[in-house]
Image (tube, rainbow, N blue to C red):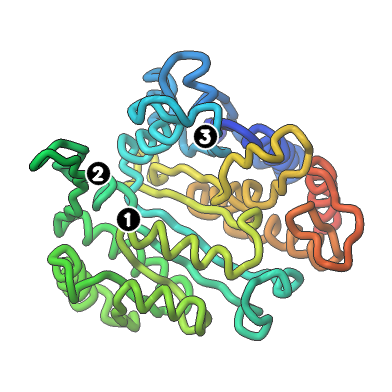
């Protein structure tokens, strides 16, 4: 059988730096675990704009549609701030999500024991935290029509439309319920049904899906503003959170900071199964392109490496190997390995991006 295929889109800023460490991990699995991948690479974001005048070339989009999974680094940077909105680097990322129909964004917020002191919250509140936020990714206010800026009564008016169909809500809900069954069998759905018609429909559809096929899962509902408050008050009350595109964007970043560093957090964006049974999928770290540290070997590669672990689990049915990689990362953190973003007040010498990759590979070897 052919090897599973991966398209790497390293992107901008620190994207290529952290992706270099992912490529070393991918090679390790091929050499030591007989788990080889056919890897290709291309451009996205500002790098694609520099080469082609667009943030995602049509040929790259075609490649993304054809592979088993896409690994993305980061896009954007101040160099591109003055570009027209239609060709900003982020438009390449949005096009990938939309045209691959990656409707379920999985954002884990896990606090490693060794990093509990790095959270802005008290250690006892975040220690052992393990939340999964499922964000609907291809509809809602970011894609709804009409949208734009126009003149009305001699002044500018900005318009964005929050729009959801029941089919879009249903498939996101089913993805979340399936995840809940594999975890603690508990799901909290968040919206604003008190003030938004789209929130009323969201709650109705989630209830209908629950009653029809997932009555074994404990379901609760919460207004999204209260959800944000509860995430910083008592985050461990949650396991799987389901929410829409806009609220998911906000709530997942809120949950991310509970863990201490964006450099630790991966994500997966999943769509419907392809002919081979694997879902359309793109995996990326939560952090941005970090232009302030680009080229300085300071970037933390762990979020990007953990994104590959998610690919092992969700695209390639290699849960045991994903566990192995996550255990290696937990081990190096417990042993005190730190990049610059993880340095505490006690100081010390941080590891470079490549050195962090070195110790993770050493930990993988030790686990053999």
User: Taking the image as drawn, is residue 368 in sight?
Assistant: no
Q: Is residue 247 left or right of residue 152?
A: right
Report the disc number at residue 143.
2
Q: Nearer the viewer, residue 364 or 154?
A: 154
C-alpha span from label 1 to label 3: 20 Å
Instruction: Residue at 12% x, 38% y: name it.
Output: 154
> Which badge, 1 or 2, is on the more N-terminal residue?
2
Check residue 245 in the rendering and tell me which mark sits there, or answer none: 1
Marks 1,2: beta carbons within 8 A: yes
Q: Is residue 347 left or right of residue 93?
A: right
In-image side of 134 versus 152 (left or right): right
Q: Depth-wise, is mark 3 or mark 2 nearer the camera?
A: 3
Q: Residues within 10 Å of mark 3 (few under 14, many from 20)?
A: many
* Image location (x, y in percent) of residue 307: 58, 49
Along the line of sight, which residue is nearer the eye, 62 or 9? 9
Q: Residue at x 85, y 49 (%)?
A: 351
- Vertical position of residue 330 compared to residue 87: above or below: below
Spot occupied by residue 16 in the image (x, y as percentages of width and height): 65, 32
Q: Quick check: 192 above or below 298?
A: below
Instruction: Indicate the position of residue 245 as horizontal and vertical percent values.
Output: 32, 55
Compute the Cα span from label 3 to label 2.
20 Å
Q: Is residue 67 left or right of residue 140?
A: right
Q: Marks 1 and 3: which is nearer the front?
A: 3
Q: Residue furthest front?
A: 154
Q: Secondary structure at mark 3?
A: loop
Label tally: 3
**Residue depicted at x 31% and y 81%:** 219
Pointers 1 and 3 in contact (CB under 8 A)?
no
Residue ranking furthest to the right: 348
Q: Image quadrant of residue 55? A: top left
Res. 76 mark:
3
Q: Secondary structure at mark 2?
A: loop
């Amino acid at each position: 059988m052919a090897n599973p295929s991966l398209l790497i889109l390293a992107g901008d800023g620190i994207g290529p730096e952290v992706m270099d460490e992912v490529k070393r991990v991918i090679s390790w699995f091929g050499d030591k675990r007989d788990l080889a991948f056919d890897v290709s690479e291309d451009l996205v974001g500002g790098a694609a704009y520099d080469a082609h005048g667009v943030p995602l070339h049509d040929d790259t989009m075609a490649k993304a549609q054809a592979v088993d999974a896409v690994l993305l680094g980061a896009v954007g940077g101040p160099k591109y701030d003055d570009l027209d909105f239609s060709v900003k680097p982020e438009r390449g990322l949005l096009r990938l999500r939309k045209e691959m129909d990656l409707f379920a964004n999985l954002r884990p917020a896990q606090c490693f024991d060794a990093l509990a002191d790095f959270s802005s919250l008290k250690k006892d509140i975040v220690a052992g935290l393990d939340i999964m936020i499922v964000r609907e990714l291809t509809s809602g206010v970011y894609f709804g029509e009409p949208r734009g800026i126009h003149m009305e009564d001699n002044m500018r008016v900005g318009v964005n439309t929050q729009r959801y169909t029941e089919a879009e809500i249903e498939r996101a809900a089913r993805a979340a319920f399936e995840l809940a069954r594999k975890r603690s069998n508990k799901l909290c759905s968040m919206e604003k049904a008190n003030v938004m018609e789209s929130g009323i429909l969201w709650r109705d559809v989630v209830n209908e899906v629950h009653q029809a096929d997932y009555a074994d899962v404990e379901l609760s509902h919460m207004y999204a503003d209260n959800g944000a408050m509860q995430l910083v008050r008592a985050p461990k009350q949650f396991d799987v959170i389901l929410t829409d595109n806009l609220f998911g964007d906000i709530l997942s970043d809120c949950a991310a900071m509970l863990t201490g560093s964006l450099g630790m957090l991966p994500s997966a964006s999943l769509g419907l199964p392809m002919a081979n049974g694997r879902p359309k999928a793109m995996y990326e770290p939560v952090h941005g392109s970090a232009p302030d540290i680009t080229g300085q070997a300071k970037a933390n590669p762990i979020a990007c490496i953990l994104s590959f672990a998610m690919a092992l689990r969700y695209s390639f049915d290699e849960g045991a190997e994903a566990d192995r990689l996550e255990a290696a990362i937990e081990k190096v953190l417990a042993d005190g390995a730190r990049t610059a973003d993880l340095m505490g007040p006690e100081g010390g010498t941080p590891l470079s991006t490549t050195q962090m990759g070195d110790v993770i590979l050493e930990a993988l070897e030790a686990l053999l």
